[in-house]
Structures are given as C-alpha cells and as structure tokens.
Image (cartoon, rainbow, N blue to C red):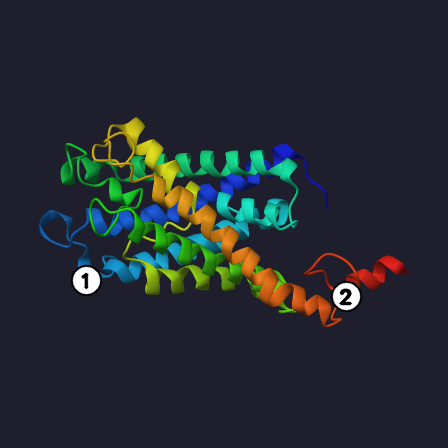
Amino acid sequence: MKFSAGQEFVAELLGTMVLILFGCGVVAMVVLFAGVGDAAIPGQIVNGGYTNIILGWGFAVLMGILIAGTISGAHLNPAVTIALAATGRFPWSKVAHYIAGQFVGAFIGAALVFAVYYARWIVFDPLLDHTTGVFSTFPAIAGTFWPGMIDQIVGTALLMAIILAIGDKLNNAAGSSWGPLGVAFAVMAIGISFGAMHGYAINPARDLGPRLFAVVAGFKNNGLTDGTMVWVVPVIGPIIGALVGAFIYDFAIGKPLLRAGEAHTGIQGVDPAYKADQKS
C-alpha cells in the first residue's frame, strides 16, 4: 500500500494525539485527584500514583501505534523518525511532515486533556503555577542539566535499539505480530527503571508539544518561557539517544546478522522470503 504525504501527516498527528490523550490523561488523573476531600475517587481505584502513570503511558503507546501503524508506521516520535532516516531505513524527504504531524498531534492532545479536566484544574491549581508537569517533564534535581541529559540519552537509546530489534525480521521473525505490544512494554520498562531523573520523556514531541500548549494556555513555571531552559533536555537528549541506540544496534546486531548470511544482499531487516519473492 502506498499513501500520500498528507495521509502520513494525518496518521502521525492522530497517533501522537492518542498517545498524549492517554499519557497526559493518566498523569492528570494522578496529579489532580489526590484522593482526599472533594477530589476523592471511590475505592482509590484510579489514583494509583506512579504505577498508574507507567501503565498509562505504556498503553498510550500501544493505542497510538494501533491507530497510525498501517499508514505511517506509527513513529509518533521525532527521535525515532530521525534515527530511522539516519540509518537508511526511512527517506529523509518524509522526515519534515512526519515530525510536523507528531508535534501538532501532541499539542492537540494536550489541549483536549486540559479541556476534559478544566473544571477540576482551576480548583486544584487556579493560578496554573504548579501543574505544568502534567504535560511535560522536569528534572528531579532542580537546576541541573547533565543528570537529565544522560538519563534521556540512555533511555531513548534503549527504546530505539529495542524498536529495531523488534522490527528486524532476521532477529525476530514474528516481530510484526507482537511489535506494538513489545514497544509498549519497552516504554513501561524504561519508565520503571529510568523514570525519575527527568520524567522519561524519551520523545521530543511528547514533551515539547504539550509544553507549547501549556505556554499558550498560560501555565507558569513551564520550563520554556520561564528562563530555566528545561525544555532542551527532553528535546535534544532523545534525538542523541535514538541515534546512539540505532547505530549501536546496527554495529552489534544488525550487520553481523547480514554478514552471517541470514539474508540475501539488501537492506538490513528485510525478510529473506520477501527477497526471494522479488526474484520469482
């Protein structure tokens, strides 16, 4: 199947919007409903704290991939798009409209989350000065740069390497059947193991898109217009990390598989059966 640039743009927009709706939505549930007083949730079923956030973001990734996967491949992440292009898996000519769709979708998703929770938001934080973290990530140690940057590089390198491993038919022949779930589990695992230092954005659009909405909506202490430059880490770190993860995977796993003769001459990750079909 072949799709137009416009269709790919819309697919990335909708997939990323769904990602943010579920992801920022679960953070809003945990932050805005503290489980006390008039905000109490019966049985405390929903207010599961960080565990809910981890699960929510994992399922958010899964739903976003299911929405956009067939048309665009569901990158949903500029760092992934750039790394795929840099390693020859994706044409540079498509990078711009993919990333544009991701940022627009993230912005819209954040706006919808705010609209859904607005009535509670203005009670919980009427000055909009301490809940920007619902939308975007912040360092665990205020005023620091490198701890968060290292965290984002390592986390996104892991994510990118796992994505390539799942999608490499020479490494995981059945990857296409369970790939979306595998990527969702990878995001959960990264959140469980590396979630605290900078909120595990591991995705520039997931962080900057909602942060831009927060600025437009009037949120203070937003990490973008308050002079702290917090936004730099979750934008630059994931791009570096994705490139590192992709190149390490190719060097250590992808190219050795090819050299071992597991595929005919061609692009790494192509199914040998597919290559054979092209010769018939």
Q: Residue at x 19, y 49 (%)?
A: 33
Q: Could one spot residue 109 in this view of the protein?
A: yes
Residue 19's spot in the image, x, y percent?
A: 43, 47
Amino acid type at mark 1:
Gly
Q: Earlier in the sequence, mark 2 or mark 1?
A: 1
Q: Could one spot residue 206 in this view of the protein?
A: no
Task: Tell me if 267 is positioned left or right of 59 in this view.
Answer: right
Label 2 neighbourhood size at 10 Å, few (<14), some (14-19), many (20+)? some
Residue 18's spot in the image, x, y percent?
A: 44, 45
| Viewer-nearest residue: 144 or 196 | 144
Give the secondary structure at mark 2.
helix
Task: Tell me if 52 is positioned left or right of 81 in this view.
Answer: left
Kindly indicate the quadrant of the structure image that contains residue 254.
bottom right
| Viewer-nearest residue: 251 or 79 | 251
Kindly indicate the quadrant of the structure image that contains residue 81.
top right
Residue 189's spot in the image, x, y percent?
A: 39, 65
Task: Tell me if 44 is positioned left or right of 238 in this view.
Answer: left
Which residue is labeled 2 in the image?
272
Amino acid type at mark 2:
Pro
Give the secondary structure at mark 1.
helix
| Viewer-nearest residue: 260 or 2 | 260
Mark drawn on residue 43: 1
